[in-house]
Amino acid sequence: MMDLTILAKYPFLNNSREYIKKNGPSVKDLLESLVYERARIIGIERLDNAFKNRDVGERSLATETDCIMELLSYPIARMIAVCVGDNFFKRRYALGEAYHAYKNLINEQTSFLIKVSKEFNLNVKYAEENKRIKIHFKDYLRNAPTRYKEWKMINRDMEKGYIYVSHKELARLLEEALRRKINKDLDSRECDETIYKVFSSEISRFQNMVMIHRKKMRTTPIGKLSVEKLPPCIKNLLSAIQAGENVPHMGRFAVVAFLNSLKLSVDEIMKIFSSAPDYEEDKTRYQVEHITGSISSTSYSPLGCEKMRTYGICPEEQIDEICKKIRHPLNYYYRKWRQKEKEEKTSTKEETGL
Ligand code: SF4
């Protein structure tokens, strides 16, 4: 069995789960007993931190009690997240757990990272001959942020189906694998009635937070952009970026080129990307400036509907009446704009009787 500090730092590991099963309190005690009040408070703190800071946060693990409370707070946070019943909230929470784990993993021994990789079913090996870490290319592709130049396959050393990665890069790949694992786990669970009753006021508070956030997203003008007039494809990609999901390169390209066509400045576009989990200002700026033509002679045109479909970024189940009449996402935006203007004119005429 691993030591308690490790279990508390990585509560998603099998060993941590087994520890709780063997030594933890009953669900009733965990939810009601005063002894575990601190675990409940930390559980809520994890969710608050994940939502606001994209990181579940760091607490002292100096004593055995600290570690036990930290460890028990994880299932509590997970159960509450399920009961909040909102995908955006769940995604943010998963991201907060995964990002925090990444920050811890960087400081562990490589052998520990390889152990965690095995638990996540990633084919990772330590090559004794050259003392390097390698990962099977399929697992690499599933988890690497390949939208960044240095992560692209073309820029990697590959040997017999394995790609060499550094310790820090393996931690980053584990972050993504964990994020997906938590997302899947949250999506497969139903809200437990008892949890709902015990945490009803916190659950309502979180639901309220999500509602306010959504409202702000809908109404906050990004430069000259009217979010409510965006086509479903761009809306989806934007909310995935802002929820911290790993949006493929083509999705990001489509968003930048689209926003650039609407004359948003590089800084305004950067603001949108700044909520991505692994946002790195320099690299993002380089990509945005490249696509918008600020540092090259070419400014790329936004993708049409057909291309969006080919790349799998047109959400076909969400297309509406306007989508059916147009062949380019930009036209969707302009049509909505004209539609709104018409509606406003009609209502002014009605009000003034002219
Ligand atoms: S049909 Fe075109 S505008 Fe509508 S969601 Fe698909 S890509 Fe976007």
Image: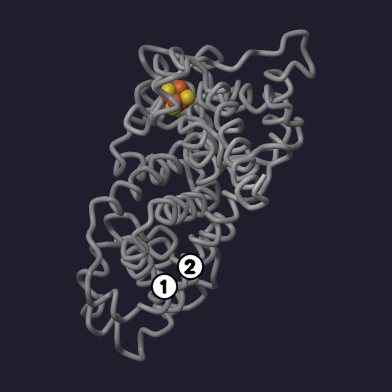
**In the picture provided, is 243 more to the left or to the right than 94?**
right
Q: Position of residue 98 (x, y in %)?
A: 46, 50
Image point 60% across, 21% down: which residue? 149
Q: Position of residue 123 (x, y in %)?
A: 32, 30
| Pointer 2 residue Cβ closer than 8 Å to ligand 1 | no
53 or 232: nearer the eye?
232
Image point 36% across, 31% down: which residue? 124
Which residue is tagged 2? 208
3D distance between C-alphas at marks 1 and 2? 6 Å
Q: How many marks?
A: 2
120 or 352: nearer the eye?
352
Please state the quadrant of the image where ligand 1 appears: top left
**Is there a contact, CB below 8 Å, between mark 1 and mark 2?**
yes
Figure check: 240 above or below 165: below
Which residue is tagged 1? 204
- Most extreme residue toward the front, as rendered? 353
Is residue 128 at least partly visible in the picture? no
